Image: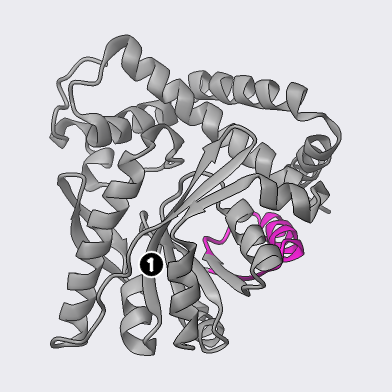
Amino acid sequence: MTPAIVHAFRAASAAARLVPPSLSVPAARGLGRLAGYLDRDRRRLVERHLRRVRGQDLAGRDLRRSVDAVFASYADYYLQSFRLPSMTPDQIVAGFTEEGYERISEAREAGNGVIMAMPHLGGWEWAAHWLTIHHDVPVGCVVESLEPPELFDWYRSFRTSLGMQVVGLGPSAGTEAMAMLRDNRAVCLPSDRHVGGVGVEVEFFGERTMLPAGPATLALRTGAVLLPIAVYDRPGGCHGVVRPAIATEREGRLRDDVARVTQVLAAELEVLISAAPEQWHLLQPNWPSDRDPASAPGAGVAA
């Protein structure tokens, strides 16, 4: 029997394609804000993440509005993603602007693939779809496995329909990602949250935490170009930003090189996230202090 949550996602996807944006966008953003008020634990986490980015003096009305904006943006992300299969190629292209695409094009000329290291920010599926239909760039992604498995299967099929090759995070993910890079794909890797496998301790927004070792490890082992990338929502579409490639030449032991490159990537992610922290869809604990609130910097600052 198909789990109820899968039916819910199918229904939401169908509604997103049928209801005009003039109605669906404000409705989705309103529901997102409501969800943020009802889920107090996630709201507190978002407050903490925003204050890491914008400063510990973020409080009161400004903090509440920023948190509301995160939940509204997250709902808008789902809406815009679910609309993509019903949009024409012309609509996809017209709704996307970019800075730095030439860095992806130049990286693919080397033939070793491209690692697009991204934060959980904005609508990356729109960017991936734009790459496939506008520039004929084959795209792959390694994403967190979801529970129940039927929901992951539904999402895999949805993203496959947008032209992506989808790999679930697990024991074989590294091998499958290397195969995609050998095919000279542009591979999307969410890189701002460690959810399993090998991690690297870094300083990220002023605190020590773990980030995934995958982007640096793959770049060092395959010669693929490592590009920090973010996709920002804007009215009617998205805007992609491609930062300069991170240097990934070997300097010593692989373990040390992975740690060095991951720390550089963390600094790049800080730049990308700081440009639009209200679009950062990180609703989970990401630092050790998130599980021990009393130990967090600025823990006594009133929200």
In which quadrant of the rendered image does the C terminus lie? top left
Residue 90 % position (x, y): 76, 52
Number of callouts: 1
* Circle 1 Cα neighbour tier, 10 Å, few/some/many (<14 / 14–19 / ≥20): many
The answer to whether 264 appears left or right of 41 in the picture is: left
Helix, strand or loop under label 1: strand
The residue that disc 1 covers is 227
The answer to whether 279 appears left or right of 167 in the picture is: left
Residue range highlighted in magenta? 143-168
Is residue 106 placed above or below 53 in the rendered structure? below
Which residue is at a point 23% across and 84% down the rendered structure image?
249
Is residue 115 placed above or below 56 in the rendered structure? below
Which residue is at a point 67% across and 67% down the rendered structure image?
132
Quarter occupied by residue 252: bottom left
Is residue 184 part of the magenta span, yes or no? no
Residue 189 % position (x, y): 46, 65
Residue 5 % position (x, y): 72, 43
Residue 71 % position (x, y): 51, 29
Is residue 118 placed above or below 104 in the rendered structure? above
The answer to whether 230 appears left or right of 205 in the picture is: right
4 or 287, which lies in front? 287
Residue type for callout 1: Leu
Which residue is at a point 66% across and 59% down the rendered structure image?
129
99 or 198, which lies in front? 99
The answer to whether 93 appears left or right of 101 in the picture is: right
